[in-house]
C-alpha cells in the first residue's frame, strides 16, 4: 500500500505512512494535546531524516523519499546501497546529531520558562529528542548506530563481514535489553 505524499522538501518526497495516519486519527479522538505532541514528534523525526537526506545529497547519494512512520520514527530511502564507508558514516551520524541538537535547543529554554503547558511541551520535546538521538546511536541494526558501527568496521573488514559482525552485536544488545526489561518488570 502506497503511503500518502504530504509534501516535498529539497526535492525529496515526504510520505506519511498509512499506519501513522491511523495513529494520528486515534490520537485526535483521544486528546488534542496528545495529537499535538505527536505532530511535534513527527516534525522532529522529519528534521532527523532531513539531516540524513541532506548529508546524502551533499555526498552525491540520491535520496528517493522520506517516509514518516509513527510510532517508530522514519526512514530516508536512498537510491544506492553501495556507499563508501566514510560517506555512510556521515549520513548515518547526521540524524542522531540533529536530534541531540533539537533536544538541546528545547532544553535550553526549560529552566527559564514559567510553569505551565508550554514548559511541559518544551520539556517533553527536550526528552524525546535526546532519547531519539541517544537510542539511534546504539551500535545495533536497524538504528543509525548500527550503520555507524558497520562503516567503522569497514576500515578493517569488507562490507559483508562488517554487516555480519554488526548483526551479531545487534542480537547481543537485543538480548540485553529484553533481559534488562524483564528484570526491571520483575523487581517493580
Image: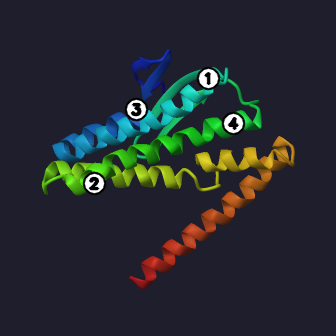
Q: Is mark 2 in CB contact (under 8 Å) with mark 1?
A: no
Task: For residue 50, say whether it is visible.
Answer: yes
Q: What is the residue that sits farthest to the top in this orientation?
A: 11
In the image, residue 127 sits, relative to residue 82, either above or below, namely: below
Is residue 22 left or right of 52 when viewed as pictured? left
Q: Which mark is residue 18?
A: 3
> Vertical placement of 33 versus 6: above or below?
below
Q: Is residue 91 left or right of residue 130?
A: right
Looking at the rendering, in which quadrant would you find the C terminus? bottom left
Q: Earlier in the sequence, mark 3 or mark 2?
A: 3
Pointer 2 local density, CA inside 10 Å: few below 14, some 14–19, many at least 20:
some
Instruction: For marks 1 and 4, give the one nearer the viewer.
Output: 1
- Mark 1, secondary structure of its residue: helix
| x, y percent for residue 13 | 48, 19
Residue 85 placement: quadrant:
top right
Name the residue at 62% across, 68% down.
175
Q: Are marks 2 and 4 in contact (CB under 8 Å)?
A: no
Colour scheme: rainbow
The residue mark sitting in front, 3 or 2, is 2
Is 52 left, or right, of 47 in this rendering?
A: right
Give the mark nearest the N terminus, 3 or 4: 3
Task: Identify the mark at residue 88; answer none if there is no mark.
Answer: 4
Q: Which residue is mark 2?
A: 123
Q: Quadrant of residue 93?
A: top right
Image mark count: 4
Counting residues from the N terminus, which is met first, the one under dot 3 or under dot 1?
Answer: 3
- Sequence-earlier tag: 1 or 4: 1
Measure the C-alpha gap from mark 1 to mark 4. Answer: 12 Å
Q: Nearer the viewer, residue 136 or 75?
A: 136
Looking at the image, residue 135 sits to the left or right of residue 176; the answer is: left
- Tell me which numbered mark, 2 or 4, is placed earlier along the sequence: 4
Q: Which circle marks residue 58 in the picture?
A: 1
Amino acid at each position: 500500500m502506497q503511503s500518502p505524499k504530504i509534501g516535498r522538501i529539497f526535492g525529496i518526497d515526504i510520505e506519511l505512512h498509512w499506519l501513522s495516519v491511523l495513529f494520528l486519527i486515534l490520537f485526535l479522538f483521544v486528546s488534542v494535546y496528545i495529537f499535538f505532541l505527536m505532530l511535534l514528534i513527527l516534525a522532529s523525526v522529519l528534521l532527523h531524516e532531513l539531516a540524513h537526506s541532506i548529508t546524502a545529497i551533499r555526498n552525491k547519494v540520491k535520496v528517493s523519499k522520506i517516509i514518516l512512520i509513527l510510532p517508530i520514527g522514519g526512514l530516508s530511502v536512498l537510491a544506492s546501497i553501495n556507499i563508501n564507508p566514510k560517506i555512510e558514516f556521515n549520513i548515518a551520524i547526521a540524524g542522531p546529531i540533529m536530534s541531540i541538537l533539537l533536544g538541546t535547543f528545547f532544553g535550553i529554554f526549560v529552566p527559564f520558562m514559567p510553569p505551565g503547558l508550554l514548559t511541559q511541551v518544551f520539556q517533553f520535546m527536550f526528552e524525546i529528542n535526546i532519547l531519539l538521538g541517544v537510542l539511534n546511536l546504539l551500535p545495533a541494526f536497524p538504528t543509525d548506530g548500527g550503520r555507524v558501527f558497520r562503516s567503522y568496521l569497514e576500515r578493517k573488514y569488507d562490507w559483508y563481514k562488517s554487516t555480519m559482525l554488526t548483526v551479531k552485536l545487534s542480537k547481543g544488545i537485543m538480548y540485553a535489553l529484553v533481559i534488562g526489561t524483564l528484570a526491571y518488570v520483575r523487581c517493580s
